[in-house]
Image: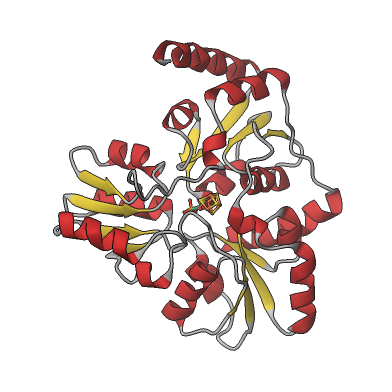
């Protein structure tokens, strides 16, 4: 296995050089996938990098909404997504037609959408956000401005609590983070009482309430790296363990994902060295987006990038 991974990594390296292809990977992908990426990051950093690079082609090691965002921002480039079925339960919870109906119901509301949405939903959105800039994006609107927040009710509720706003929340959730229980965090805390608890805001409010810090994957990694503490309980998808241990060697990390409470994102794990190699070799599957939809979606993503 090690040997075949080594060979595949070499072949991928050679192909991406020949084709001037940039490989972007999210922290939730497999360790060996993160190892061959040119850049790993959270959703915001990946969108920023997709908008600003001089590659001829982008291969997205992540899920479909991320690859769509890359295509929206770099329409002239071929964008490869090794597995088209790599979806996202949160993005799937928000249909464009339903959102259109909600907008008709609340015509005086602006729409803020988490980037975990389809390109069609982004096209109906005023400003996108990620978990690392949601506070700034929502804060960019007047206090009086009414807002519909899609699709993550946990993240939206978190922002409502922090800002005192009363945004209308789409009732979506990430099946991975929403499944984390208070009990599982408390059990880990009982085993490691000195550990700081770092939580992704896609988790339920009662889980976020246990956090010493709540923020995006990159926020969690940076907090662990810069904190004086030596021990941390990591309450998000366990793919981040690879980067966090690299960034903060010598510190101790306890993932919420354990044999009896596994919180892996099966969509992120669909991307493998094998399908990356095949995608690069054949230059498919390719992400295609209707131009009218792309232009409308681009506005809401660029609005976000202007804010942060
Ligand atoms: P961030 O990397 O922006 O924290 O997002 C988490 C996530 O669920 C991506 O799908
Ligand atoms: Fe979507 Fe949740 Fe997987 Fe992120 S972890 S890609 S939000 S299903």
* Residue 141 visible in the picture: yes
Q: Quadrant of the N terminus?
A: top left
Q: Is residue 33 left or right of residue 209?
A: right
Tell which of 30 and 60 is nearer to you.
30
Going 49% across and 75% down the picture, which residue do you hit? 157
Image coords of residue 85 (percent x, y)? 67, 40
* Residue 115 visible in the picture: no
* Residue occupying the far left of the picture: 194
Q: Is residue 92 above or below residue 87?
A: below
Tell which of 282 and 185 is nearer to you.
185
Going 50% across and 30% down the picture, which residue do you hit? 38
Q: Quadrant of residue 24?
A: top right
Tell which of 307 and 210 is nearer to you.
210
Going 79% across and 40% down the picture, which residue do you hit? 288
Image coords of residue 179 (percent x, y)? 45, 59
Image coords of residue 268 (percent x, y)? 53, 41
Q: How is the image coloured?
A: secondary structure
Q: Is residue 86 left or right of residue 134?
A: right
Q: Is residue 214 left or right of residue 287?
A: left
Numbered marks: total? 0
Going 26% across and 53% down the picture, which residue do you hit? 233
Q: Is residue 222 above or below residue 27?
A: below
* Residue occupying the far bottom of the picture: 144
Q: Quadrant of residue 213?
A: bottom left
Q: Is residue 194 above or below residue 38?
A: below
* Residue occupying the far front of the picture: 260
């Amino acid at each position: 296995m090690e040997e075949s991974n080594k060979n595949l990594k070499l072949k991928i390296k050679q192909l991406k050089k020949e084709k001037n292809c940039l490989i972007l990977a999210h922290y939730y992908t497999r360790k060996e996938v993160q190892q061959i990426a040119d850049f790993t990051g959270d959703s915001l950093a990946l969108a920023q990098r997709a908008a600003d690079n001089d590659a001829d082609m982008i291969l997205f090691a992540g899920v479909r909404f991320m690859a769509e965002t890359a295509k929206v921002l770099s329409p002239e480039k071929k964008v490869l997504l090794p597995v088209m079925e790599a979806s996202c339960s949160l993005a799937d919870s928000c249909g464009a037609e339903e959102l259109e109906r909600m907008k008709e119901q609340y015509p005086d509301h602006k729409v803020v959408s988490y980037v975990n949405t389809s390109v069609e939903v982004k096209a109906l959105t005023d400003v996108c956000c990620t978990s690392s800039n949601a506070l700034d994006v929502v804060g960019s609107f007047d206090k009086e401005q009414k807002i519909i927040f899609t699709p993550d009710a946990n993240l939206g509720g978190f922002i409502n609590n922090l800002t005192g706003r009363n945004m209308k929340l789409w009732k979506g959730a990430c099946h991975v983070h929403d499944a984390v229980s208070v009990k599982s965090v408390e059990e880990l805390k009982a085993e490691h009482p000195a550990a700081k608890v770092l939580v992704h805001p896609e988790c339920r409010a009662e889980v976020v309430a246990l956090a010493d810090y709540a923020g995006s994957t990159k926020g969690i990694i940076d907090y662990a790296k810069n904190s004086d503490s030596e021990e941390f309980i990591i309450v998000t998808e366990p793919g981040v363990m690879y980067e966090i241990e690299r960034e903060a060697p010598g510190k101790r990390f306890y993932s919420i994902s354990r044999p009896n409470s596994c919180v892996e994102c099966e969509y992120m794990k669909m991307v493998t060295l094998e399908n990356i190699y095949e995608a690069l070799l054949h230059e498919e599957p390719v992400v295609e987006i209707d131009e009218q939809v792309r232009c409308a979606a681009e506005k809401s993503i660029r609005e976000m990038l202007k804010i942060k």
